[in-house]
């Protein structure tokens, strides 16, 4: 029983990180209807940004403190938000009226660029990531890592903040309007370009947070660290119903739990395949995802 | 192409001739540089992979990101067959002769192709319900699943990799199969039957309304494309003589997709050119090893932004326009580049 609970907790922590990445996929899909393949690499850049920030101005900040870690995290999130906006402006905006395939390939190109440029600039060797010292907390038979607790807390805060932005602010309302219908939103006086930029900024900041949290729990970072979590987070977004924000969070947590239980079983080496198997099953039997609505194709 | 079958026969004969010349040079003490030979195999295999993917992605308009998975299925099947069954089959075929070895290789390749076609059938079925991005992700997922399964199969070495005993691949088989792939894809697409692929590509709903069995066309495209990817994989297995599951990850699939995009979707000549250029490019860029993949990815982005129809499509239409101006012959007004 305690092993079950332990795997459950580990899965929840992993799922929280998947959820943070999945939100970025789902929001961009909501407004632009395409898969931003580069999102998983922004996740990686987020972890590296925190690594370098803590090396650079770690001296000026109280080391290994919650305050220092918060500042570094916020700075990395801001840097990634900027990166996301720049990528959208340079690579995706000129292609907005072109076929989706072209945008998809461009996104793959951006993703490859970030990975290979990362190997060149950051080095291909894994680096040790230490933002906060981790302590184990024992609750009965269960071992809780302090970093896991941070993952839960931070994910919860970010999800609530996102929900507030999307549901209760003007710009969030504009985002929802754009995701319904570009043209109608534009006619209502919404500046589509700035909303799309904002969506990218928001999604990229969340990916950066996810990257930092991931690096705190699996403390070796390398330029290709984003590839598999990114793909799985995308699966999570589809699982929950792509374009649907609560769905992405739900999908992330579910996927994290499943993966954690598979890793704890004797099929552990198949853990990387399980996400895709789930994806295929979901798309075969409920293509709209758990919380998504079915869209009828009209001619 | 006025007489495609004659052309095919001629090019096959040419392949045989060149291949014989190379092996003759090797025997008479002037061997062709092995590096160039292996690069030539890589180019041929790339052509097979890109042209077969073009049937799925270019002509039929289904976005598959799992071609490396099909390739892996073919490579492992062919490699295991020739390594394990080869030594038993050769005595039955009259002992150690070039003929017996060719039969073993051909059988291995074809069975590898069939194994890949079977996986293609498995992937083709979900493709009936999905399109665009979703299909891309599902095919990517299938490719990754094949890779993980291979990694967990001790019989083929698991993640340690698998050594293929015989280096059967030569210029004749590589380019012979490349020609056959091109011929089959072209013949299929340009036949009355094959117009259905283009119809599915242009507008699925309209095609269905016209009475075209879109499901069947999509599955046919997947199975045929996968078959040739499997052949390509078999050639790869017997050229490198070592297979590792991580060599068939989705980066490999993306490489093949890039060839198709760069060549221009549904433009076989362009895709062949792109396969050649993109296989040679990393070799040429080898001196600046660290930067080559950065350059490669940047080129990809710039290309998509500047000529989304594919580089060679743009060059092709530019040339046509130039020729038209020079000769002063105006083609029908409806022609657009």
Image: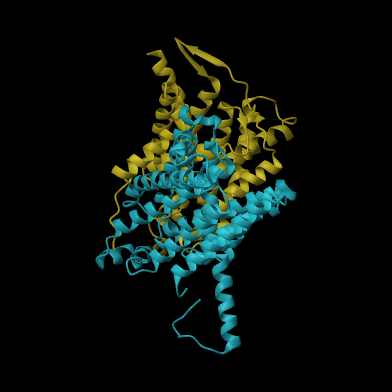
Relative placement, left or right, of A64 versus B144 is right
Residue occupying image coordinates x 61% and y 60%? B302
- Between B130 and B36, the one lying in front of the other is B36
Relative placement, left or right, of A176 versus B300 is left
Give coordinates of residue A234: x percent, y percent. Answer: 45, 42
Q: In the current view of this chain or complex, which residue is farthest to the bottom?
A: B328
- Between B237 and A125, the one lying in front of the other is B237
- Between B263 and A55, the one lying in front of the other is B263
The quarter holding residue B19 reads: bottom right
Q: Quadrant of the N terminus of chain A?
A: top left
Colour mapping used in the image? by chain
Does A28 sit above or below residue B150?
A: below
Residue occupying image coordinates x 68% and y 48%? B34
Residue occupying image coordinates x 49% and y 69%? B7
Residue occupying image coordinates x 40% and y 56%? B62
Give coordinates of residue B158: x percent, y percent. Answer: 50, 30
Relative placement, left or right, of A122 versus B307 is right
Q: Quadrant of the C terminus of chain A?
A: bottom left
Colour in which chain A is shown?
Answer: yellow
Give coordinates of residue B61: x percent, y percent. Answer: 41, 60
Give coordinates of residue B107: x percent, y percent. Answer: 43, 45
One can see residue B279 in this view? yes
One can see residue A26 in this view? no
Q: In the current view of this chain or complex, which residue is farthest to the top?
A: A140
Colour in which chain B is shown?
Answer: cyan
- How many numbered circles are shown? 0
């Amino acid at each position: 029983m305690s092993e079950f609970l332990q795997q459950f907790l580990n899965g929840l922590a992993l799922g929280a990180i998947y959820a943070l990445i999945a939100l970025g996929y789902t929001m961009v899909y909501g407004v632009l209807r395409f898969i931003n393949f580069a999102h998983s690499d922004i996740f990686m850049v987020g972890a590296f940004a925190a690594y370098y920030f803590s090396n650079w101005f770690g001296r000026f900040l109280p080391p290994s403190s919650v305050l220092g870690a918060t500042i570094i995290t916020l700075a990395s999130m801001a840097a990634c938000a900027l990166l996301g906006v720049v990528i959208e402006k340079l690579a995706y905006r000129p292609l907005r009226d072109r076929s989706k395939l072209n945008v998809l390939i461009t996104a793959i190109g951006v993703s490859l660029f970030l990975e290979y440029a990362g190997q060149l600039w950051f080095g291909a060797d894994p680096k040790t990531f230490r933002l906060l010292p981790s302590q184990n907390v024992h609750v009965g038979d269960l071992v809780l890592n302090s970093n896991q607790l941070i993952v839960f807390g931070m994910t919860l805060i970010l999800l609530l903040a996102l929900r507030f932005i999307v549901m209760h602010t003007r710009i969030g309302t504009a985002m929802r309007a754009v995701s319904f219908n570009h043209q109608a939103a534009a006619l209502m006086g919404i500046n589509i370009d700035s909303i799309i930029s904002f969506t990218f900024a928001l999604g990229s900041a969340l990916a950066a947070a996810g990257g930092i949290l991931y690096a705190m729990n699996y403390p070796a970072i390398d330029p290709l660290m984003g590839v598999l979590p990114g793909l799985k987070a995308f699966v999570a977004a589809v699982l929950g119903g792509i374009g649907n924000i609560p769905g992405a969070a739900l999908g992330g947590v579910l996927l994290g739990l499943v993966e954690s239980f598979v890793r704890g079983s004797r099929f552990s080496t198949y853990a990387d395949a399980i996400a895709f198997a789930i994806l295929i099953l979901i798309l075969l039997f409920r293509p709209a995802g758990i919380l998504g609505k079915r869209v009828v194709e009209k001619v | 192409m006025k007489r495609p079958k004659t052309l095919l026969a001629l090019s096959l004969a040419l392949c045989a001739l060149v291949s014989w010349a190379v092996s003759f040079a090797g025997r008479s003490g002037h061997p062709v540089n092995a590096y160039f030979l292996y690069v030539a195999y890589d180019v041929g295999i790339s052509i097979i992979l890109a042209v077969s993917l073009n049937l799925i992605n270019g002509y039929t308009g289904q976005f598959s990101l799992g071609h490396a998975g099909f390739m892996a299925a073919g490579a492992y099947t062919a490699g295991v067959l020739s390594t394990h069954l080869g030594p038993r089959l050769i005595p039955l075929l009259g002992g150690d002769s070039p003929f017996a070895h060719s039969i073993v290789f051909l059988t291995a390749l074809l069975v590898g192709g069939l194994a890949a076609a079977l996986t293609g059938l498995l992937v083709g079925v979900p493709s009936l319900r999905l399109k665009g991005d979703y299909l891309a992700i599902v095919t990517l997922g299938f490719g990754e699943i094949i890779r993980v399964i291979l990694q967990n199969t001790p019989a083929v070495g698991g993640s340690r990799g698998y050594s293929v005993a015989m280096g059967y691949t030569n210029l004749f088989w590589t380019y012979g199969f490349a020609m056959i792939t091109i011929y089959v894809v072209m013949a299929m697409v340009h036949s009355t039957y094959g117009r259905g692929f283009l119809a599915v590509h242009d507008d699925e709903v309209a095609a269905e309304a016209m009475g075209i069995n879109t499901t069947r066309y999509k599955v046919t495209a997947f199975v045929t494309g996968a078959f040739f990817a499997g052949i390509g994989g078999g050639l790869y297995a017997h050229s490198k003589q070592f297979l590792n599951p991580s060599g068939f990850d989705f980066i490999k699939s993306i490489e093949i997709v890039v060839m198709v995009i760069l060549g221009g979707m549904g433009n076989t000549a362009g895709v062949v050119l792109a396969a050649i250029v993109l296989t040679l490019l990393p070799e040429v860029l080898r001196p600046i090893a660290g930067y080559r993949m950065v350059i490669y990815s940047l080129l990809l982005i710039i290309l998509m932004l500047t000529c989304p129809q594919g580089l060679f499509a743009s060059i092709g239409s530019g040339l046509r326009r130039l020729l038209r101006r020079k000769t002063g012959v105006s083609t029908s007004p409806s022609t657009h580049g």
